[in-house]
Amino acid sequence: MPKRYKEEFKTMHNVFDQFTDRNIFKLISEGHFDGLIGPINLGKESNTFVAKKGDEKVLLKIYRLQNCDFNRMYDYIKYDPRYQHLKKRRREIIFAWCQREFRNLLKARELGIAVPKPITFKFNILVMELIGDPAPKLKDMPPSNPQECYEKILLSMKKLYKSGLVHSDLSPFNILMENDIPYIIDWSQCTSKENPLAKEYLKRDIKNIYHYFNKFNLSITLEQMEKKIKGK
């Protein structure tokens, strides 16, 4: 790798530790992408970057190993039967959190829900399809047809609930709009209905979607939404 690129890479990655940087280079050497283009979002728990892969682009989501609320992560993941072996150790929880998002994305795609295609993961790094270049969030781009968009999101929530899962963090902040298709993102906190807090999470998801679409004067109520999602 040329010295100049190495320096640019280090500058772009000054928020990461050496462990994360090493694994980014490993993913590059494995052919999952060629290099980073630039950041999309630098958040409290994760950072997202656009990366180039040949003539195409992919998305990297990198969970912070130090500055993240792993206690909150554990509260979501401890009820997941896939991760009952987990002990309350920071890195173990963060690695499982990343893997969990990968697995939940696969599950959502199996259900026919519009989500980014997961490509691979390594420890705290998730590589996935880039929607748009990148696509705007629903909160920033009102849909051309609010009723149609609302119905698509509600159908996705229904499919997910029927499979035994709740997104648990659904809002206009976690929905991307591309070609009038609402792509749901941020799946790491998606939890089983067996979680004792699942009902509370579902109600919160419903309220978030309701409050957004209610401003378009659609004929919807919280009660109707819940009944449709639960198939009643």
Image (spheres, grey):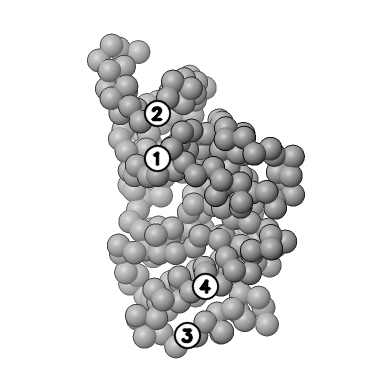
Q: Position of residue 159 (x, y in %)?
A: 63, 66
Q: What residue sits 45% from the left and 76% below the top?
A: 210
- Vertical arrangement, residue 33 with respect to residue 104, above or below: above
Describe the element under mark 2 as helix, strand or loop: loop
User: In the figure, residue 60 lies in which quadrant?
Assistant: top left
Report the Cα–Cα distance between label 1 and label 4. 27 Å
Question: In the rendered view of the protein, which quadrant contains the C terminus?
Answer: bottom right
Residue beneath disc 3: 220
Question: In the rendered view of the protein, which quadrant contains the N terminus?
Answer: top left
What crowding class fits label 1: few (fewer than 14 Cα within 10 Å), some (14-19), or many (20 or more)?
A: some
Q: What residue sits 56% from the left and 45% below the top?
A: 71
* Between discs 1 and 4, the one toward the N terminus: 1
What crowding class fits label 3: few (fewer than 14 Cα within 10 Å), some (14-19), or many (20 or more)?
A: few
Taking the image as shown, residue 85 lies to the left or right of residue 21, namely right
Describe the element under mark 4 as helix, strand or loop: helix
Q: Are marks 1 and 4 in contact (CB under 8 Å)?
A: no
Residue beneath disc 4: 206
User: Disc 3 residue type?
Assistant: Ile
User: Disc 2 residue type?
Assistant: Phe
Residue beneath disc 2: 16
Report the Cα–Cα distance between label 4 and label 2. 35 Å
Q: Foreground mark, 2 or 3?
A: 2
User: Disc 4 residue type?
Assistant: Ile
53 vs 96, nearest the viewer: 96
Q: Position of residue 181 (x, y in %)?
A: 43, 63
Q: Are marks 2 and 1 in contact (CB under 8 Å)?
A: yes
